[in-house]
Image (spheres, rainbow, N blue to C red):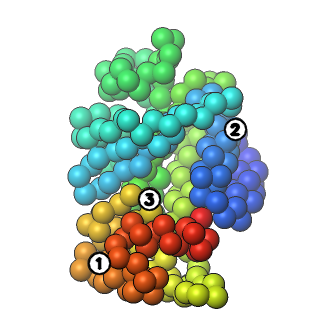
Amino acid sequence: MIERNTWEQNLAKINSVENVNKKIKMIIECFLSTFSIEETMLFRYSPIDHLAEGIVCANTNEFKCISSIRDDVTTIPAIFEAIQKKSAQYFESNDFHLNIPRKYIIAENQNSLLVVPITFNHVVVGYFLGTHFHKNFDPQLLMEANLFSSQVGEMLFNHPCYVENNEIKLSKREFEVMKCVAFGYSSKQIAHLLEISETTIKQYIKSVMSKTNTSNRTHAVAFLFQKRILT
């Protein structure tokens, strides 16, 4: 059985890391070790159009970009089931081969898959796919996987009340919106995620553009990274 205190302590340490890419790498390493998994894939997910985009495929020795993978998850029963239930699901043997597309099969001897949705504000924003377990899978791990992923969602999207440096101050909402913009979400997707109107999202973006004296959202994100307000 997994020691919850161990992975919670590991995530607490990771949460203090400012650089997003480094934080994601450390979260993946924690996921692999916590659930005794040899390989995993991390995806971004849009609840608006059910589109999944690959972020990274990783094992204990290698991390590689999988941004070329883009899928409508409604066509992938195993993943869509986990997303609809907002709960980790485990598939093996016939269930695995019937529900998983070939491109998600990393090795010839792969015959099982763990799907772990990542949630924020009760909305699925991404998911882990885990395979090649170092020991027999215990169904009780599904509950731990759900707790793990909910904390990951909070770590990636929850922010302080405001962020400021000597030149600019952002409200909590402005920071949340710009963080989502930096992750590649559209205004419509951000509105769904944060449960506010698309018009309000656009107003927040315009407010940040005004504060940063930038001409568009891409320029604003670049400015915020330059000033280390986004990391």
Question: For this rendering, which residue is in front, 11 or 54?
Answer: 54
Question: For this rendering, which residue is in front, 166 or 32?
Answer: 166
- Image point 49% across, 77% down: which residue? 175
The residue singled out by tag 1 in the image is: 202
The amino acid pointed to by label 2 is Ser
Quarter of the image with the C terminus is bottom right
Say above or below: 115 vs 206: above
Say above or below: 92 vs 184: above
Residue 33 screen position, x and y as percent: 69, 38
Residue 193 screen position, x and y as percent: 36, 66
CA–CA distance in space, label 3 to label 1:
16 Å
Q: Is residue 75 visible?
A: yes
Left or right: where does residue 90 sit relative to residue 101?
right
The amino acid pointed to by label 3 is Phe
CA–CA distance in space, label 1 to label 2:
40 Å
The residue singled out by tag 3 in the image is: 183
